Amino acid sequence: MSRKAILSIIICLMLFGSGIFIGADKVSAAAKQTVTAAKVKSAPTGLADPAWQKAKAVEVPFEGKEKFAGQKTAVTTKAVYTGDGIYFKFDWKDPTKSVTKGAWKFDGQKWSHQKGNEDRISLLFEIERIDKFATKGCAVVCHVPAGKTAKDGKFGTTSPAEKGDLWHWKAARSDPAGFADDTWLTQISEEKGGRKSDAGKGGDQKNMTADKSKPMYMPAPGKKLAAGNVLLVAHAVEIKDYTGFKAGDTVTYRMPKMPVGSRADIKAISRHTDGGWSVILFRKLDTGHDDDVAFNPRKKYNFAMALFDDSGDEDSYDSEVLTLQFSR
Amino acid sequence: MDTLSEMLALGDIMARVKALRVPADALTWHRFSGSLLLVLLVLLFLSGAFMAFYYSPAPGAAYDSVDYALYSVPFGDVIKGVHHYGWNIFLIVLGLHLVRAFIVAAYKSPRQLIWVSGVLTLLLIPALIITGDLLPWDQNGFWTTQVRISIIASVPLVGDFMVRLIQGGPLTGIVALTRFYVLHILFLPALLIILIVIHFHFLKTRGLSEPLFKKGSQSKTISFFPQLINRWLLLFLAVTLVLGVLSWYWPAPLGDPADPTDSTFVPRPEWWVLSLNQLVTIFKGSLTVIGSVIIPGGLVVLLLALPFLDTSPDRHPARRKKVVLTAIVVAIILLGLSVMGYNEHFNGNVS
Amino acid sequence: MKRNGKAESISSDRRAFIKTAALCGGAISLAGIPLAGYFISPALKKGTGKWVDFGVAEDLTPGSIEMLSYEFMVKDGWQVLPQRGFVWAKTEAAGNIQIFSSTCTHLACNVIWREDEKIFECPCHSGRFDINGRPLAGPPTRPLSVLEHKIEDENLLVYLTF
């Protein structure tokens, strides 16, 4: 090859180089935040795992709705993935750890429900494209009938062809069992919203007697309470003798079940310290279930999050829609 | 081989193809841009034709079909990537092809019409890009189209009519998308092929331009088949490999699905159109027509008329000072405008 | 005789050419006119408009700029689709209303009202308009178009073209 040949090859390479540079995806909207899942060799095993250092933290702003209107908060979000799993880590400030969810309290005479809800975080992905979710986020799946308040709002898509994957971490009802509730979203029905539980079993069981006056179960002998002093269904035994309770004793009202099947896809690790929550949610990239989004690391995904601070469904902090992408 | 051609009654054609001789420098280390363009064009046609298997031209469904083709069909990302990087590189190489033809004055008599057909080919590319960009029905394609449509609409007298003609109505909806699709995959490529056939017709009858410094290599010839074909096939293999690997590592972008109600999306002009876009930004209001019609139109006329304006037999750039200088000034202005546009749209803080 | 023969062949050549040209012209117009009409026809239709109801006019707060969203069905060729968008209503005193199109007069992006600066801003090229829709800065030179409106049975109706 002559000098000319080498020169030609260099010119060719430069051509292709500029083609890539120019053709690269620089033309994107400025507004949308992107969470990039970093590729890691071995899955993170806990909150302090060094794998998390590979992921870039994204400070996702949340805006309060209804009871929290006008207030703002933020969740520091990280994501990593391995050959077959995806791992999210969320850190947010919350001085009060709320896991009460109406737990029973004995005052020496009678049982009553304590005031207090629970902390939650939820994520919504698309299984089948939800029209305008990519630009409008959760707003397109919240339907408040005209003239009604947010309390009557329904959560769901506008057609059965649109499917969402809703990850629902509940500090009192799912976390003590080590899971986030795996649910999905479909078309809104007249009566109810479009929220459905994934196939399988899970959720929680109400701990009360038939007349709803007192708890029915207590921890079985030798069984400990789970995180947040929550009694799991698996550890519960029927109360035979109520005389053993003293004034001030508390018993879990909503007892988490051990989920099975597709509903058990999302596992959770959490900790509440230093005035805030740290939560890891992880799942297989592709669970093989049709009520879950299958993540393809070559693709980008839209998702949005909501945070509930000791509050019900209508009072939340919502994020804008975000992009999830996977690093190489 | 012989029996096969006999069976197919190809003897006559085979003999003519075998007898065909072309100049030895038709495809060499220093003259390859034309052949490279042909390679890229074949790849664009192939990838485009196959992408059509998984495409449905209706708003919404279009995005889903492209998304499906990209991520759910084997080699989907490679095919789309080859098309995506292919046209970007095609446009650059086409520019270089033109610059080279200009520098060595390949447009001079008797090759005026080779130049003219080439320039017409160049003018067809924006039409292909404009119609192609809308097809994935993503945010960027949709809003870029809106900007382009409004630039066309700003042309006095005929602007509104042209927009309706291109889109088949006032809206960028299903009618517009179907039109863009059919134009992109049928009418415009057909026109492109016709122009290239014309280009080759004149190339064959008028011959390649001689090297500026004659060293007697001119009379050397090689056989069209197999020598030239083999060189071209080697180039094809190399380019396909490079584009395929590129597309595998950096998949072609696909943005969010188009949302015509989203006012927050800010489309950014593509690199090749930055200078023209900047012209529209500079000439505002009633002067828009200068930036959107008069200057680009003038440049096009100048390019097309070049062989008939610069008629001296001198081919060496040093002996064509006036023409070369004018071209350099125009090139610098266009480059300057592009830099201005780049700064405004990519570095500028769009608040 | 020879000469005559040559002339004859020229004239027969010409005759053949004219014949072919005429046939060609006939074929092109016969096929071309319907085809061109088929392609061009949508461009010949004039734009249409529609009065869109934005609800009770008195609900607008005097002294403010409010975003009024609309959604109505539009037939695009063979597909009926909701057309969504918004306009800006400037209310001075009760009854004194001005409706601005949200379309930037530069390149058709949507302008957004910024209450803190009291300007309309186009996010695409940083065009700015004052509270009366007059261009202040950036590429736009024409004011935001003021849309025709009327009040019927207390409801605000705005004429939207598309």
Image (cartoon, coloured by chain):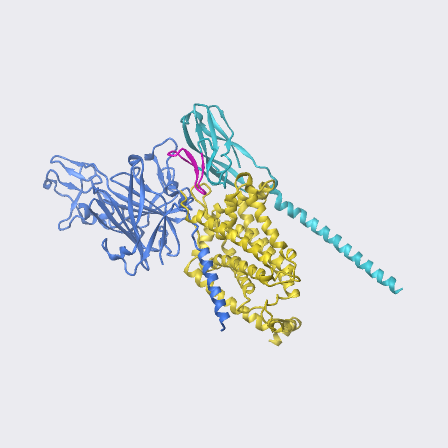
- Of residue C9 and residue C33, the one placed in the foreground of this image is C9
Answer above or below: position of C74 versus B114: above
| Whole-percent x, y for residue B282 in the image | 51, 44
Viewed as shown, does residue B202 lie left or right of C158? Answer: right
Residue B138 visible in the shown view: no
Residue extending farthest to the bottom is B2
- Of residue B330 and residue B72, the one placed in the foreground of this image is B330
Q: Residue drawn 46% across and 59% down?
A: A18
Any idea which chain is the yellow one in this picture? B
Any idea which chain is the blue one in this picture? A
**Quarter of the figure that contains the C terminus of chain B:** top left
Can you tell which quarter of the image residue A74 is in?
Answer: top left
| Whole-percent x, y for residue B32 in the image | 54, 66
Viewed as shown, does residue A234 lie left or right of B196? Answer: left
| Whole-percent x, y for residue A184 in the image | 35, 47
Residue extending farthest to the right is C1
Viewed as shown, does residue B92 lie left or right of B117? Answer: left
Q: Colour of chain C?
A: cyan
Query: Is residue C113 on the magenta stretch?
Result: yes
**Quarter of the figure that contains the N terminus of chain B:** bottom right
Tell me which segment is drawn in magenta: C112-129
Residue A182 visible in the shown view: yes
Query: Is residue A299 on the magenta stretch?
Result: no
Answer above or below: position of C100 versus B164: above
| Whole-percent x, y for residue A238 in the image | 17, 45
- Of residue B335 and residue B260, the one placed in the foreground of this image is B335
What is the total number of numbered labels drawn onto the structure image?
0
Q: Residue drawn 27% across and 55% down?
A: A53
